[in-house]
Image (cartoon, rainbow, N blue to C red):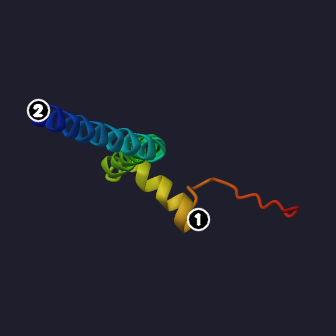
Amino acid sequence: MRLCKSSLITKFVILAVMLYAIITIVTLQPKISDLKQEQTALEGDVAAMQQSNLALREDIDALGTDASVLKIARERLNLVSDGEIIYIDSSK
């Protein structure tokens, strides 16, 4: 009789633990899906940032060249070379 009671209690404990594990898995599944989507989005952001960093490194490496100095002078300082003619579009 005593052996039967202890095995019945053991079965109930195992059943309770299994139910708890199943309920926990089911309730956490949506959160896991959301976190996977967020991970995918963040991986895309990381890839974009790495591409941007690569472009910036190339710009930094090119800063000392004559072509980059000329480009900066044209874009930021509005300078022109000798013999160039500036046309201003008055329609804009």
The circle on residue 3 is: 2
Q: Which residue is mark 1?
A: 78
Residue 51 percent location from the top left of the image: 41, 42
Reading the chain from its start, which is encountered first: label 2 or label 1?
Answer: 2
Name the residue located 44 percent from the left edge and 46 percent from the top edge: 27
* 91 relative to 59, above or below: below
Q: Nearer the viewer, residue 19 or 31?
A: 19
Q: Give the position of the N terminus as an image quadrant.
A: top left
* Rendered image quadrant of residue 36: top left
Total numbered labels: 2
Q: Give the position of the C terminus as an image quadrant.
A: bottom right
Mark 2 is surrounded, within 10 Å at the Cα level, by few (under 14), some (14 to 19) or many (20 or more) other residues, namely few
Mark 1 is surrounded, within 10 Å at the Cα level, by few (under 14), some (14 to 19) or many (20 or more) other residues, namely few
Q: Amino acid at mark 1?
A: Asn
Q: Nearer the viewer, residue 58 or 20?
A: 20
Q: Secondary structure at mark 1?
A: loop
Residue 86 percent location from the top left of the image: 71, 58
Residue 62 percent location from the top left of the image: 35, 47
Name the residue located 37 percent from the left edge and 38 percent from the top edge: 22
**Which residue is at the far right?**
91
Q: Nearer the viewer, residue 4 or 16?
A: 4
Name the residue located 41 percent from the left edge and 46 percent from the top edge: 28
Distance between the Cα atoms at labels 2 and 1?
A: 96 Å
